[in-house]
Image (spheres, grey):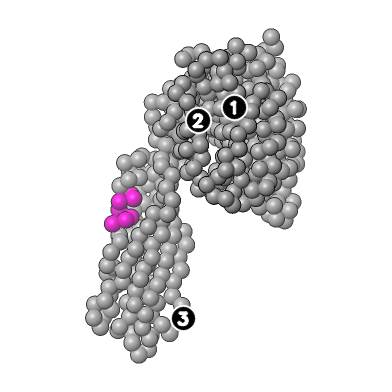
Amino acid sequence: MPDIPNHLASQLPDALEMLRVMVGINSFTGNPEGVNRLARYTADCFALLGFTAEYVPSYNPAWGNHLVLSRPGASGRSIAMISHLDTVFPPEEEKRNNFHWQVEGDRIFGPGTQDIKGGTVMIWQVLSALQACAPAVFNTIQWRLFLNSSEETYSPDFGEVCRARFGLGCLGALVFEGEGRSNGERKLVIARKGRATWRVRVLGRAAHAGGGHKRGANALVQLGQILNRIAGLTDYSRHLTFNVGVASGGTVLNRVPHEAVAEGEFRAFDPAVYEEAKGAFLALAGPGAVRSVADQYACEVVCEILTESRPWPRNPGTDRLFALWKQTAEELDSPTGGEERGGLSDGNLVWDAVPTIDGLGPWGDNDHCSERSADGTKVPEFLGVSSIVPKAILNTHAIIRLASAS
Ligand SMILES: [Zn+2]
């Protein structure tokens, strides 16, 4: 039987060719034809390993299909692997910024190289290594791969797609977002903040700014006061941040504005802090302090939560998986730690259903960036090629350990 490092090293050219084709397919979330084309190509790649495809429509008809790939196993135990199909780059932006597959030294630039097509190919590499080097594990486990069509936007339905298919004997959900790095150590993701988006509307009372000023209840002034209070809910000591994102209001200069609106988001790691923050935000609703001088008519403040992605806090299931990866990394003499990240992933949607770990993809940087400047101050998304094989070795050994430990 070939050994795992040799297999992964010799197979790297095939993996990179697969990645090159994937990066060449524009799969912006708002380009469902592209997302579906990438899904079909991905299904073809995994068909070589015995996987069958199921295409699940997104709840939003403007987006492509989620992709579920399955391979039966001899035991009742399963392992889930999660990636996504979409990127944040519209085709016009790729063209405008001449952003495409480009190899320069150890870096491969291109849309989705790091977020997350490099992660999808990593799944293929790991499964191929298991098939060649650990066939007993490969054939025993039921494999379920979930690829979100719309991870880069709000897609709570994808969590339901996964949860309905994990099955009872699911040992873990492995998420292949890119790894972090600091001080020469790779970082796996073991917690992520939750995020809610919100809107505040203020209904005031219009008045002529010259003749009826005292009758007016100024919605913009009221909104300003409320936004200050919202900003004041930020508490760095508890990793709670509120961001006021956009605001607008008023119509013309000679009118006391009767309407104003703002939107933003808040984030927290701790579910209790998150709930408390949500309560504090919603409590701002009701009659405001800005009133008409003529008759005390009060502006009305309306608070809404628009979307919610719950926090993925530290928990025993994740800690158990992290311990497996860490122990494996120590044996491979490959320094590895964990990090709690502010950004969301599909891990937020599934961690409370099965033990979840994230950051299992290769290393890269500048995800969500497509611009490049001549002076080097702007560098687009890239994948670090030399991170691929060592990470695949670590993942393969850790998965063998996960399959045998249970
Ligand atoms: Zn991603």
Q: What SS does tag 1 mark? A: strand
Q: Report whether the residue tagged 3 is closer than 8 Å to ligand 1.
A: no
| Circle 3 residue | 252
Q: Residue at x 38, y 29 (%)?
A: 315
Residue 332 visible in this rendered orientation of the protein: no
Image depth: mark 1 or mark 3 in front: 1
The magenta segment is: 277-283
Find out whether the residues at labels 2 and 1 contact each other: C-beta distance under 8 Å. Answer: yes
Marking on residue 257 = none
Mark 1 vs mark 3: which is more N-terminal?
1
The amino acid at mark 1 is: Ser
Mark 2: few, some, or many residues within 10 Å (few <14, many ≥20)? some
Residue 169, percent from left and from top = 46, 21
Mark 1: few, some, or many residues within 10 Å (few <14, many ≥20)? some
Mark 2 vs mark 1: which is more N-terminal?
1
| Circle 2 residue | 165
The image quarter containing residue 225 is bottom left
The image quarter containing residue 22 is top right
Q: Residue at x 65, y 17 (%)?
A: 131
| Circle 1 residue | 70
Give the left or right position of residue 309, taking residue 213 as reference: right
Image depth: mark 2 or mark 3 in front: 2
Estimate the spatial distance between the alpha carbons at disc 1 and disc 3, rounded to whole Å: 59 Å
The amino acid at mark 3 is: Val
Residue 134, percent from left and from top = 62, 13
Residue 269, percent from left and from top = 39, 40
Return the residue found at the far left.
Answer: 295
Return the residue found at the far bottom.
Answer: 211
Q: What SS does tag 2 mark? A: loop
Assign the magenta stretch its main secondary structure: helix
Estimate the spatial distance between the alpha carbons at disc 2 and disc 1, rounded to whole Å: 10 Å
